[in-house]
Image (spheres, coloured by chain):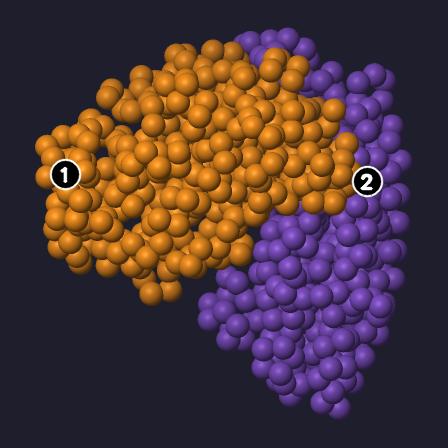
Chain colours: A orange, B purple
Amino acid sequence: MKRRAFLGGAAALGAGAAIDRVIGPGGGAPAAQAAGAPAVSTAPIAFEGVHQAGILTPAPPHAIFAAFDAIAPSRAELATALEALSERARRLTRGYDALLGAPGEGPTPDSGILGPRVTPDGLTVTVAFGASLFDSRYGLAARKPRALKPMTTFADDALVAEECHGDVLLQLCANSEMTLLNALRDLMRATRGSLAPRWKVEGFLPVSKERGAPRNLLGFKDGTANPAATDGRLMDRVVWARDGEPAWAAGGTYQVVRIIRNRVEFWDRVARQEQELMIGRDKGTGAPLGRTKEGDDPGYPSDPKGDRIPMDAHIRLARPRTPETEGSRILRRGYSYSRGLDMSGQLDMGLVFCCFQADVEKQFEVVQKRLAGEPLIDYVVPTGGGYFFAPPGARDSQDWVGSGLFV
Amino acid sequence: MLRPFAVVAALALVALAGCGGGKDGHASNPPAQPYSKRSTAPGAVARVTPADYRRPLATYKRYVGRQLGTLLGEVAVLRAAIARHDLAGARAAWLKADARYESIGAAYGAFGDLDAAVNGRPDGLPGGVRSPEFTGLHRIELALWRHRSTRDAAAPARHLARAVARLRAKVGAMTIDPLEYSLRAHEILEDAIHLQLSGQASPWSGSALVALRAEVRGTEVVLGTLRPLIVRRDVGGALPQAHRALSRLSAALARMERADGSLPRWDRLAQRNRELVDGLAAGAAEQLAYVPELIDPRPPRPAQRPFGDSG
């Protein structure tokens, strides 16, 4: 609380001035990015488009998932807040000269934590809505996306109410944590009094020279079998919701977020072979058991009884690769998280599971049901998250994500 | 409160006597616009001076005096309940007295050590709640809620009564620093968010909502006294926005009141209701933050370097 305090003595005045006034334009080029880091892009990722960014765009190393509840007093003020999200997101993702504040301007306009020049730093801002936004409060019930509902509680879940659900989900992804925190503070400030924070979790991906899918905190490659986000026709089938959706929602997607704690101490006390049989992959190479390369097909037809890859191995249950089950594929875009200790002194870390699909019940939930009771469940505990609908992107510089709800 | 009030006041006086308003001899980079002209109030409205605060401060001191008079009576009721071992009665009286003290949050800085004697918290004391220095309202709160003991509350209640009586006697002579007062218009609510809504200030009684209600009213009183100074300079409409945000917060609290005016425990509130109060309080703080600079009583500071237009 020293921001306005007079510093005693004339000599100190200069120092004070340097702190709370603008240093002027400039700031130089952004620091060189770490070589070999996956999906580290310095070019701006367009906020506008048919679909929102942060879904098919490659995952940069850091993410924040933050859920909010709407407390706006009216439908119009809710619309204003949602419009503000897009307006700020547009500026944040493009890069800008920060307004650090000047005398007579009141509170400092920007956080300033990135200095005078803010670069795009791979930032994407993805806005999604929970089923509760479509209750009676704002008269949006008739606009509810067809398949949106509150997150199901599954038999193996241990959900903590405080970190479940939410009216609005912000998914922020970027190359650095500072860029994310600057964006989060900016977006929260712009919607203060209309969107109240509900829960938040921060995620990261390994910055590693290893090829292929990133490793999770169980030490296994995770995401190898993901459908290719570059395959437009596949994405139309897997990700984008169209059939039966209200007109405003066509081109959006259903987003599932699940905070899945990993019991890492317990896991580390399990022999490698046991771990591999539970997952279905080699821990070193990531290859399906009995195969040589990470990308190899597991070849289930040649292993009908599960001698090589057990029938209840995670990868086999999640994607049996039969004609009947390929319709339940999902696009995963998860992050690891780590956040302190529990009362027993064990590390609270795990996976922020995140996936996108055209229909939650026909895709994520089908996979989830196949996984019920898998051996791995002793080592993972879902504690939070929610189901959301990420609407289509802002069409142009005047449009905003969710505008279709209010026309 | 860590602000150096005395230094501020002294500098203000020196600067007022000798300063023409922001001319500095040592600026190697002359500012694009003289600092003195970068006023918060475009146009011809003069900057606020400490002298402008005389009337608002006199009005506020009368208000504080009245509140302390009432508090004295409420503390007497509290002591009577404690003396007859009426736990429920003592708790009810404590809630009233605590809220009364929360309603005069712009005067704490002028209370000096007596503020800690009335409203001190165990944080920062060696030994925490066991420290002999931990006394006052929150020591009584610990006795009445955590220990469920009127006996344990008797001695701190006696000390409280003495401290409040001394405050009441002092109030006419006390000096509230103008800068401090302008900042409190905003920061009573910052303290409410930081101390009350975090559950830190009243952990045993869970009375954060009761305190918040009083702090909102106290903020409105401060804004009321400053209104004549603010409105002439408030081209951006900060004051009406702040009032609107405070009204929303008050209305939300009113909806949570029971028939007898009592409020639920903060730590038992449903998540949605907690988010509503958190969100509205944060929203109000966002608006109130614009107020102090409009009525900054300090002389303009000489510019040390130019300001970039974009930054």
The picture places residue B266, in percent across and down from the top left corner, at 65, 62
Q: What separation in Å lies between label 1 and label 2 (alpha carbons)?
A: 70 Å
A176 shown above or below B211 = above
User: Which quadrant would residue A203 be assigned to in this image?
Assistant: top left
What chain does badge 2 belong to? B
Chain letter behind tag 1: A
Amino acid identity at mark 1: Ser
Residue that label 1 marks: A302
Kindly state the secondary structure of the residue where label 2 is placed. Answer: helix
- Callout 2: 10 Å neighbours few (<14), some, many (20+)? some
Mark 1 is surrounded, within 10 Å at the Cα level, by few (under 14), some (14 to 19) or many (20 or more) other residues, namely few
When asked about the image quadrant of residue A389, the answer is top right
- Count of marks placed on residues: 2
Q: Nearer the viewer, residue B109 or A197?
A: A197
Above-or-below relation of A212 to A193? above
Check chain identity for marks 1 and 2: say if they share one.
no
Does residue B257 appear left or right of residue A304 in this picture?
right
Residue at numbered disc 2: B244
Q: Please report the residue visible at 71 percent of the width from the left and 60 percent of the height from the top.
A: B209
Expressed as whole percent of the image width and height from the top left, the position of residue B189 reads: 70, 48
Task: Give left or right: position of A51 versus A144.
Answer: left
Q: Nearer the viewer, residue B105 or A10?
A: B105
Callout 2, which amino acid? Arg
Q: Position of residue A393 (x, y in %)?
A: 56, 21
Residue at 63% in and 85% down: B149
Residue that appears at 85% across and 18% down = B44
Q: Secondary structure at mark 1?
A: helix
Expressed as whole percent of the image width and height from the top left, the position of residue A305 reads 16, 49
| Residue A42 appears in the rendering | yes
Rendered view: B73 above or below A87: below
**Which mark, residue A294?**
none
**The N terminus of chain A appears in which quarter of the rendering?**
top right
